[in-house]
Image (cartoon, grey):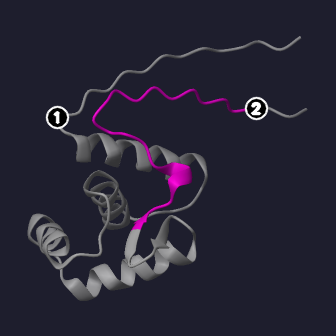
């Protein structure tokens, strides 16, 4: 018989992007994806804004995170290659498989299974 351990954690964030950053940080850690902080920031920003294709959205990200458009392009290439970002027509968006509505609370159920 297995002993089951249940632990409840609660974390409040001030806005949608910070909540999204927390979610994608957990997703990266649990799946051993190895996303950098800047990649997580870009994914979260893109998820909340809807895409990262338009010049004004890119400019907002660059100003907020003090980075360049060239850096964004490099990050987008890597994230598309691993399937986190996808091309939807002319727009680059977060893959629908990992996109949530960050305007609402997010509840995660995480099971880490010990195989014997």
In front here: 12 or 84? Answer: 84
Above or below 20: residue 84? below
Task: Assess disc 2: are there few (<14), some (14-19) or many (≥20) residues with their C-alpha within 10 Å of its C-alpha.
Answer: few
- Residue extending farthest to the left is 63
- Residue 105 shown in magenta: yes
The label nearer to you, 1 versus 2, is: 1
Q: Which residue is mark 1?
A: 14
x, y percent for residue 28:
51, 53
User: Which quadrant would the N terminus be assigned to in this image?
Assistant: top right
At horizontal 58% and vertical 46% (from top left) the residue drawn is: 30
Q: Which residues are magenta?
A: 93-113
Q: Is residue 21 rendered to the left or right of residue 35?
A: left
Q: Secondary structure at mark 1?
A: loop
Task: State the SS at label 2.
Answer: loop
How would you classify the magenta stretch by its main secondary structure? Answer: loop
Residue 116, image x, y percentages: 91, 32
Q: Residues within 10 Å of mark 1 (few under 14, many from 20)?
A: few
Q: Is residue 110 above or below residue 90?
A: above
Q: Residue at x 42, y 42 (%)?
A: 100
84 or 41: nearer the eye?
Answer: 84
Residue 20 included in the magenta stretch of the image: no
Residue at image coords 56%, 51%: 97
- Please give the residue where the numbered disc 2 appears in the rendered image: 113
């Amino acid at each position: 018989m297995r002993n089951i351990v249940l632990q409840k954690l609660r974390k409040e964030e001030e806005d949608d992007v910070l909540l999204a950053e927390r979610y994608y940080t957990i997703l990266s850690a649990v799946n051993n994806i190895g996303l950098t902080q800047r990649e997580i920031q870009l994914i979260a920003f893109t998820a909340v804004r809807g895409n990262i294709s338009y010049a004004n959205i890119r400019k907002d990200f660059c100003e907020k995170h003090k980075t360049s458009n060239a850096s964004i392009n490099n990050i987008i290439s890597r994230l598309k290659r691993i399937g986190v970002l996808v091309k939807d027509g002319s727009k680059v968006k977060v893959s629908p498989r990992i996109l949530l509505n960050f305007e609402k609370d997010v509840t995660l159920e995480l099971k880490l299974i010990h195989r014997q």
